[in-house]
Image (spheres, rainbow, N blue to C red):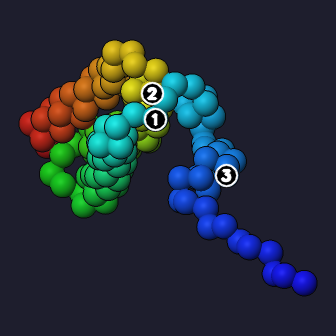
């Protein structure tokens, strides 16, 4: 008996015959076409920048209260709580921003604005007011 002849398949043929892996979240990846990888990677870097910002805000809120600076204690506590709240909201902005931007890239629509940016700016402005007022009253 003759051994069967095995024909080698090209990488392209293998890729076309393989089932597409499911990607999370489906609400983003199930629509549209794959954008230029540079844009997706830039979107991911922005996501990670929001995460780094979140960690810094959380650390700042804890440090402000833990270090016991010469700031009136009630104002210092309010500023610390606001910083921690901003640190908790920043990952929400990171996720929502990444998801909306990636979807817009895939379906070819204009890029969305940062939806949580204004609330974060208002909260951070409040931190500045509390720290300044607390330092003046100490």
* Quadrant in the picture for the C terminus: top left
Element on which disc 3 rests: loop
Q: Nearer the viewer, residue 129 or 133?
A: 129
Residue on which the image places disc 2: 106
Pointers 2 and 3 in contact (C-beta within 8 Å): no
Element on which disc 1 rests: loop
Residue on which the image places disc 1: 34
Q: Position of residue 14 (x, y in %)?
A: 61, 56
Task: Return the residue found at the far top.
Answer: 109
Name which residue lies at 40% across and 19% down: 108
Element on which disc 2 rests: helix
Q: Where is 71 relative to 39, above or below?
A: below
Q: Quadrant of residue 136?
A: top left
For marks 2 and 3, the one nearer the N-term is 3
Pointers 1 and 2 in contact (C-beta within 8 Å): yes
For marks 1 and 2, the one nearer the N-term is 1
Task: Mark 2: give few (<14), some (14-19) or many (20+) Cα within 10 Å.
Answer: some
Residue 96 relative to residue 38: left or right: right
Q: Position of residue 79 (x, y in %)?
A: 29, 39
């Amino acid at each position: 008996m003759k051994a069967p002849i095995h024909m080698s398949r090209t990488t392209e043929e293998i890729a076309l015959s393989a089932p597409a892996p499911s990607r999370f979240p489906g609400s983003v990846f199930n629509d549209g076409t794959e954008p230029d990888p540079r844009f997706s990677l830039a979107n991911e870097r922005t996501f990670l920048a929001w995460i780094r910002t979140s960690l810094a805000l959380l650390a700042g809120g804890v440090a402000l209260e833990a270090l016991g600076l010469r700031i009136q204690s009630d104002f210092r506590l309010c500023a610390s709580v606001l910083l921690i709240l901003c640190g908790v909201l920043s990952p929400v902005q990171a996720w929502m921003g990444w998801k909306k931007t990636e979807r817009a890239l895939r379906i070819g629509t204009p890029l969305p604005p940062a939806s949580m940016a204004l609330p974060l700016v208002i909260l951070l402005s409040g931190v500045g007011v509390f720290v300044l007022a607390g330092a003046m009253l100490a």
